[in-house]
Image (tube, rainbow, N blue to C red):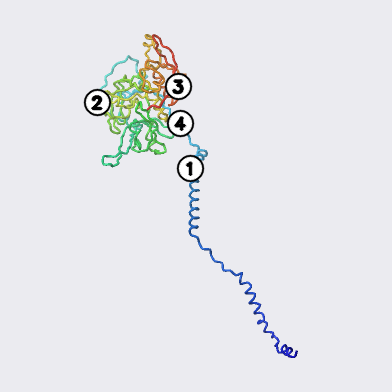
Amino acid sequence: MSDNKRDKTSVPEPESGGGSNLSEPASGASSRDIDFIKEKVKERPINKRKLLKRTMITASMAVIFGLIACFTFLVLEPVFSNWLYPEEEPAPVQLQEEAENEEMLPEDMVLETETEEEKESAPIASTVVQKVDMSVSDYQKLYSNLYKLAQDGAKSMVTVTGVVSDVDWLNNTYENKGQTAGLIVADNGKELMILTEKEIVEQAEKVHVTFCDNTQATATVKQSDPTTGLAVICVSLSDISDETKEAIKAAKLGSSNSGSGLLATPVIALGRPMGTANSVAYGIITSMDTVLNLTDGNYHLLTTDIYGSTNGSGVIINLNGQVLGIISQRNNSSDAKNLISALGISDLKNNIEKLSNGQPMATLGIYGTDVPAEIQESQGVPAGAYITGIVMDSPAMVAGIQSGDVIVKMGTEEITSFKEYKEEMMTLLPDSQITLTVMRQVQDEYQEMTVDVILETLK
C-alpha cells in the first residue's frame, strides 16, 4: 500500500505546456486513418490506334455527308431554280412567209429613177425599147452597187468549221478541219439557227462558226436531213457579243417556185462558191426545170452560168437580197460539174423549219410525182401522189405499197399532189402510225384500199 501510494505520488503532474505532447499520438493516428483515401490521379495512356480509328471514322462520315449534300444540291438546285426563276422555252421556229421576188434590174442601179412628179406628168405611151448607152464608169458603178448588195447579204453568211481528231501513219495525233458555208435562217430567242452541209458537221468532234465580223463561237448540231444532205446547227445567243448581234442578221427568203419567173434572173453567189471563204460571183439562172426525185420528196435544182468550184457551198440571192437557193454541187451533171447549182429554197422551207426545231425526219420510203391533169382525164388516173418507186425494206414495202399506187389521203388529210404528200410528211414523227388511203389499179379501174403504216426515222 505504501509502495503504491509512493508510486502515485512520484508521478509528476502534467504541466500546462505539455498538452502538445499528449496530442501528438492522437494526431498521428488520425493521419494514418485517412492515408488510405488519398490517391494520386494518373492520366490514362493514349491509345493511338483507337484515336486514329476514330479520326478516320469522323473524316469518312464528313466526306460521306459532304457528298450527300452535294448530290442533293445538284439534284434539287435545277428544280428550285426553275421554280423560283422559270426559264422561258425557246419559241418554235417558223420561217417567214415567202416574199415575192421584187427584182431590181441592173440598169436601175446605174440610171437615176424618175421623180413622182415626172411620172405623173409623163404622157402614157406604148412600150418602146430604149437603148441605154453605158460607159466604163457606169460599169464600175454597176459592179460597185452589186458588191454592196453582196456585202449586205454576207451578214447572213457564216463559215462553219468541223474539227475531227485523226492519227497519221507515225501514230501522231492531229486535227483534221473541214470548212463549208452556213446561212443564218432563224433566231428562237435562245439560239441562232444556221443551215449548213451535213457532211462537215455530223461527224465533227467540235464545230466552230465564224461570223461576218470574224468573231467565232462554238456550235452544236441541232438536226440533220440525210435526203438533202443539209443540217441545222445552233449557237447560243449568250455566246455572241452585242456587237456581233448588231453585225449579223437572219436571211430573207424568196421564192423558187416554177411560176415565179426566175429564168434569166440575175443572181449573186455568196459564201464559198469558189471553194474559199467570202468569195463572190455574179451570173444568171439558166435553168430551173431539173427535178431531183429523192426519198419522200422532190426538189427543183436551179442552175446558173457561174463557173465555180465543185466543192462550192453557200447560197444564191437575187438583186433584192432574197435567198433563192442553197448551193449543192453534188447533183451536177458530168459536163457541167463546175457550174454553180442550188436547191430551190421553196422546196426546202419545211425541211428547214423541222430541222431548226430539232425534230427527226420521218420516212415512208417512196419516190413519186404528180399526176398531170391530161393523164387524169385520158387514162382515169386519180389525182394524188403517184408512186414511181419503193425504197428497199422501207415502211412502204413492209406495208405492201406498190409502184403505180396513188396516195389520195393521209389520215384525214386529202392529198392531190406529191408536194402535198411531202408537206404532210413533214408534220409527222418517226414511230408514229398513219392510215393511208391508196388507189390501186385492178384491171381497168382503180380501187380504193387503206393501209396502216408505222413510219421510221430517215437515215
Comes first in the chain, label 3 or label 4: 4
Comes first in the chain, label 1 or label 3: 1
Which quadrant holds the N terminus? bottom right
Distance Cα–Cα, label 2 vs label 3: 64 Å
Q: Residues within 10 Å of mark 1 (few under 14, many from 20)?
A: few
Tell me the residue that label 4 is attached to.
91
CB-based contact (under 8 Å), mark 1 and mark 3: no
CB-based contact (under 8 Å), mark 2 and mark 4: no
| Foreground: disc 1 or disc 4 | 1
Q: Which mark is residue 74?
A: 1
Tell me the residue that label 2 is attached to.
135
Distance Cα–Cα, label 3 vs label 4: 28 Å
Specify whether 403 is left or right of 64.
left
Comes first in the chain, label 2 or label 3: 2
Which quadrant holds the C terminus? top left
Q: Height in image: 218 above or below 380?
A: below
Distance Cα–Cα, label 1 vs label 4: 27 Å
Q: Quadrant of residue 374?
A: top left
Q: Amino acid at mark 3?
A: Ile
Residue drawn 45% across the image and 33% down it: 90
Across and down, in percent, residue 159 comes to 33, 34
Q: Amino acid at mark 2?
A: Ser
> In the current view of this chain or complex, which residue is farthest to the right?
1
Across and down, in percent, residue 394 comes to 38, 23
| Foreground: disc 2 or disc 3 | 3
| Foreground: disc 1 or disc 3 | 3
Across and down, in percent, residue 178 comes to 31, 35
Q: Residues within 10 Å of mark 2 (few under 14, many from 20)?
A: few
Distance Cα–Cα, label 1 vs label 3: 42 Å
Q: Which mark is residue 434?
A: 3
